[in-house]
Image: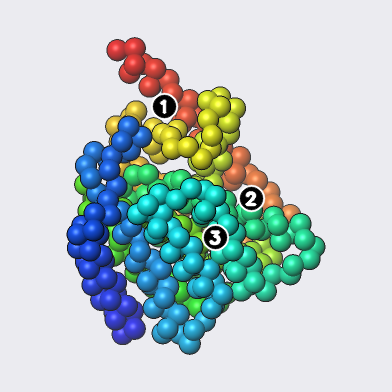
Amino acid sequence: MEKNLIVLCILIVASFVYLKLANKFNIVDKPNERSSHTKVTIRGGGIIFPIAILLFFFLNDFQYPFFVLGLFLISFVSFLDDIYTLSSRVRFPFQIIAISLILFQAAFPVFPLYYSVLCLVLGVAVINMFNFMDGINGITGMYSLAVLSGMYFINLKEAIVHTDLIVFSGLSLLVFGFYNFRKKALFFAGDIGSIAIGMLLFFIGFLFVLKLQSPIFLLLILVYGVDTALTMLYRIVYTKESVLDPHRHHVYQKLVDVSKISHLKVSMGYAVLQLVVNFTILKTYKLELSTQLIVFFGVIVLFIILYIFLFRLLAKKAKMNNAT
């Protein structure tokens, strides 16, 4: 408890110092036609996520060195992207290196090679998914806390990772929430925040799947996964847009723009949905593999139907709004 209090105090100070420095050096996010905010806001506040992981590293005998190295490599590049806006050709190689270090940390076998390539692609997809979904106040912090809570309770039973890694990261999300879980955020996570938290959750989730031999842990990021996958499919099939270009087609964006639901209510809704999925995982991850697969695909299909229904409903409402 004393260690947690020390970490919390350090994170509070670090967030305050960063806010002042970012304001001084103009590290800001300026609103445009694709933004959900209307005023210039400090970006990169998610820098406290890698700081929390660095504190874990030093306070717990330098555990998971390759993961920490990969996370700080990609955090550094992502922070540069927050300041200068780097091209994907610069960012992707570092993301591949970072995920490769996670696979190495987990002692994942190199062969058969297609397994390694599949996990590498999945890891890069997950960290970019968290970046894509970071578009309204509260969503990154609330959703990540929901995912971490599921990981925490599973880890209490199975002891897959050091508990402090989850707890310190959760504390950083709470501190971040003080600045971001509000109608007018004081700062945004930025690429450094969304990429770092995505990498952390991929690392822990990957260890769960690998050590417990249970595919159902992939559902720990189901809500984000379904939204991202269906949005990408919509853009590829219907709008013919590049999936890398900024857009406003995510369901969470449409809930804010079309239905005029507040950022925090939408963010809380996503977190609550994930908490329901977490409960399902906790109740089923020790069942027979065949039963797990039925639950796994059943929950995915259920959420796909839910999101398609919401998307069509919002599209119809948008047409009605435009007509009036």
2 vs 1, front mark: 1
- Residue ID for mark 2: 296
* Quadrant position of the C terminus in the picture: top left
In the figure, 311 relative to 63: above or below? above
Residue 247 or 171: which is nearer the viewer?
247
Q: Amino acid at mark 3?
A: Phe
Q: CA distance from mark 2 to mark 3?
A: 32 Å
Farthest bottom residue?
61
How is the model colour-coded?
Answer: rainbow
Circle 3: element type:
helix
2 vs 3, front mark: 3
The percent position of residue 123, horizontal first and vertical second, equals 59, 57
Quarter location, residue 211: bottom right
Q: Amino acid at mark 1?
A: Leu
- Residue ID for mark 1: 314
Q: Amino acid at mark 2?
A: Phe
Q: CA distance from mark 3 to mark 1?
A: 37 Å
Circle 1: element type:
helix
Which residue is depicted at the point 55% across and 53% down?
92
- Residue ID for mark 3: 94
